[in-house]
Image: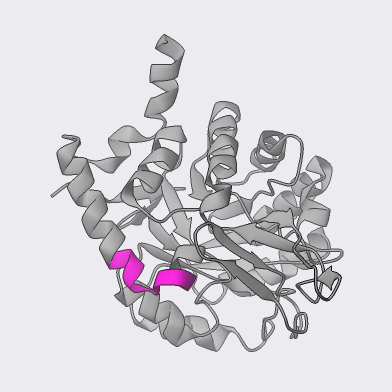
Amino acid sequence: MADLRTTVAGLPFRNPLWLASGIWGESGNSLKGAWDAGAGGVVTKSIGSQPRMGYPNPTIETYEKWGMLNAMGLPNPGIDEYPQEIAVARAAGAAVIGSVFGADADEFATLAARMAATGVVALELNLSCPHAKGLGSEIGQDPDQVRDVVRAVKRAVRIPVIAKITPNHFDPASLAAAAESAGADAISAINTIRALSIDVQLRRPVLANGLGGLSGPAIKPVGLACVWQIFDRVKIPIVGVGGIQQPDDVLEYVLAGARAVELGTAVAFEGIGVFSRLARELSQRLDTLQVSRIEELVGAAHTVSARS
């Protein structure tokens, strides 16, 4: 069986398949469930300073073959309540990555310090939610603000910091470079793509918020392109996100430069059993390709492309 172990920002993971933030991470038991099902790492819901209800329904529209549109509005119990959920997942042995969001560098730094104190192995900074006013990509589309946030967080914590980059920018790789220049230990790319669906009968947007974020297979080519461009611009590790359902989806991201990937919509559609299935099938696929370790393939498509 091929070796699926990987290392991101100096941290070892049993396989490259992580639970993405915002999916199945509402509670410690759900994080534990994803870990027990075979995830290599689990990313929490994005947590803020205060409890947040999120947007009213409807918040999700699903498309059978190509993905999901959502505008949840970053609902979360707040940093005062969430550490007890992390404790449940950590007690199960899970490698937990804590996700935080804030309105400015100071809020990010304060949240990061509190999240780090829960014992998470790393932090993921949500600089990329496409539909939360004054948060997410409204901050993360400005390289200077990305730099300020990452620098402030790095001063506040001693664990690895992963900056999650938005695709809703003309040059996502420049955002990754800004994060790296401020000391980020890794990049995750991408978050959902800003999108809209309209109900013709009602003559209004389907989602209560109007605009939402598109995820799933439809955005995989965009995610791959971002990872490809980021790999050419930065030296730090990359975590690929967007449209991963099958073993070759994982391998495409790895060949483009990712050392790990995050699964979100696939979990929503298939359940947490996707982790064990995908780990098994990925190992078998590598055996077929006569590759003994998945890390051998990181960025390999760039080498082939350069020779073409």
Is 161 on the left or on the right of 103, as rendered?
A: left
Q: Is residue 246 above or below residue 113?
A: above
Farthest-out residue, left: 1
Residue pictured at 50% horizontal, 47% vertical = 240
What's the coloring here?
one colour
Query: Magenta includes 179?
Result: no
Q: Nearer the viewer, residue 214 or 118?
A: 214
Farthest-out residue, top: 307
Is 4 on the left or on the right of 90, as rendered?
A: left
Is 64 on the left or on the right of 286, as rendered?
A: right
Residue 41 in which image quadrant? bottom left
Q: Nearer the viewer, residue 28 or 274?
A: 274
Estimate the x, y position of residue 158 in percent, counting from the top left: 57, 58
Residue 48 in which image quadrant? bottom right
Farthest-out residue, front: 201
Residue pictured at 49% horizontal, 59% vertical = 65
In this picture, which residue range is highlighted in magenta?
268-276
Estimate the x, y position of residue 135 in percent, counting from the top left: 80, 63
Image quarter hosting the C terminus: top left
Residue pictured at 76% horizontal, 73% vertical = 207
Estimate the x, y position of residue 68 in percent, counting from the top left: 59, 64
Q: Is residue 18 above or below residue 170?
A: below
Q: Is residue 80 above or below residue 41?
A: below
Q: Is residue 165 above or below residue 101?
A: above
Q: Nearer the viewer, residue 86 or 290?
A: 290
Estimate the x, y position of residue 260 in percent, counting from the top left: 42, 49
Q: How many marks?
A: 0
Q: Is residue 188 visible?
A: no
Residue 305 in which image quadrant? top left
Q: Is residue 279 visible?
A: yes
What secondary structure prevails in the magenta region? helix
